[in-house]
Image (spheres, rainbow, N blue to C red):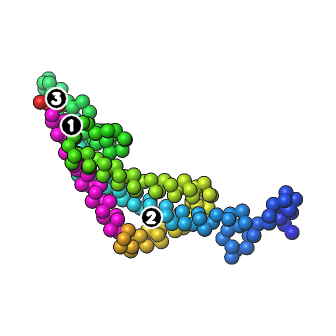
């Protein structure tokens, strides 16, 4: 009997089965649940990463960035020639991220298209991020070490399976379309607000 087995018996603990054919010991009774969490985490992380890419490279975000860069350049040029130039109170990109990510209520003068676009954008971001957080939290609570190793083990295989699953691809396309369109509408709404402050 090994020292580890003797120590286990002296402490009144069950013996650990360390044979190669067994992937989990008696201490690790939650292995099947952890494995399912790892598979779910792989799919959810792929969905969340795709939506993050769509959100950050959407027309809305890029146009906000371009207009902020133009306003900044205009201010610098005006300062060089000694003229006064109008500057927005808040950059478009900062307002875009504030409304999309934080739970700020839209201004009262926004019509239904702006409100629906903001709600849809927030919904898609939460839909893609929340399940990933839940699966990671659940898997981590069961076993941090085994869950991390299992995630790395199944990541490539599950990414390939997800890419071949037509329902997941349709979900990915719908989420990307809603994220891209709603972010563009949010940009238009913020741009109109910014122009109203000039008048």
Q: Which residue is drawn at 57% across and 66% down?
A: 35
Counting other residues with Cα less than 10 Å from the Cα at mark 1, is it few (<14), some (14-19), or many (20 or more)?
Answer: few
Residue 122 located left or right of residue 22: left
User: Whole-percent x and y of residue 189?
Assistant: 20, 43
Judge from the rendering whether residue 188 lies leftward or rightward of residue 134; answer left or right.
Answer: left
Identify whether 92 is placed above or below 16. above
Element assignment for label 1: loop
Q: Where does the magenta region start and end?
A: 169-196
Whether residue 105 is visible = yes
Left or right position of 159 against 194: right
Q: Is the magenta stretch mostly helix, strand or loop?
A: helix
Residue that numbered label 2 is attached to:
43
Q: Where is residue 148 in the image (x, y as percent from the top left)?
A: 57, 59
Identity of the residue drawn at 80% across and 64% down: 14
Q: Does the magenta run of residues contain 93?
A: no
> Where does residue 33 sit, x and y in percent of width and height?
59, 65
Query: What numbered label is drawn on residue 109?
Result: 1
x 32%, y 38%: residue: 105
Closer to the camera in the image, 175 or 153: 175
Residue 170 part of the magenta segment = yes
- The disc, 1 or 3, on the residue closer to the chain's N-terminal end is 3
The mark nearer the N terminus, 2 or 3, is 2
């Amino acid at each position: 009997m090994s020292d580890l087995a003797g120590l286990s018996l002296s402490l009144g603990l069950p013996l650990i089965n360390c044979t190669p054919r067994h992937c989990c010991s008696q201490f690790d009774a939650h292995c099947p649940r952890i494995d399912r969490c790892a598979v779910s985490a792989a799919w959810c992380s792929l969905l969340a990463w795709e939506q993050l890419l769509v959100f950050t490279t959407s027309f809305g975000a890029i146009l906000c960035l371009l207009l902020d860069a133009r306003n900044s350049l205009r201010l610098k040029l005006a300062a060089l020639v000694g003229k006064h130039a109008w500057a927005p109170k808040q950059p478009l990109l900062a307002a875009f991220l504030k409304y999309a990510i934080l739970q700020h209520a839209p201004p009262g003068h926004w019509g239904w298209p702006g409100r629906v676009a903001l709600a849809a954008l927030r919904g898609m971001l939460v839909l893609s991020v929340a399940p990933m957080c839940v699966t990671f939290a659940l898997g981590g609570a069961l076993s941090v070490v085994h869950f991390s190793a299992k995630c790395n083990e199944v990541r490539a295989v599950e990414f390939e399976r997800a890419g071949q699953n037509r329902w997941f691809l349709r979900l990915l396309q719908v989420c990307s379309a809603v994220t891209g369109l709603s972010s563009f509408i949010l940009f238009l709404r913020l741009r109109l607000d910014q122009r109203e402050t000039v008048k």
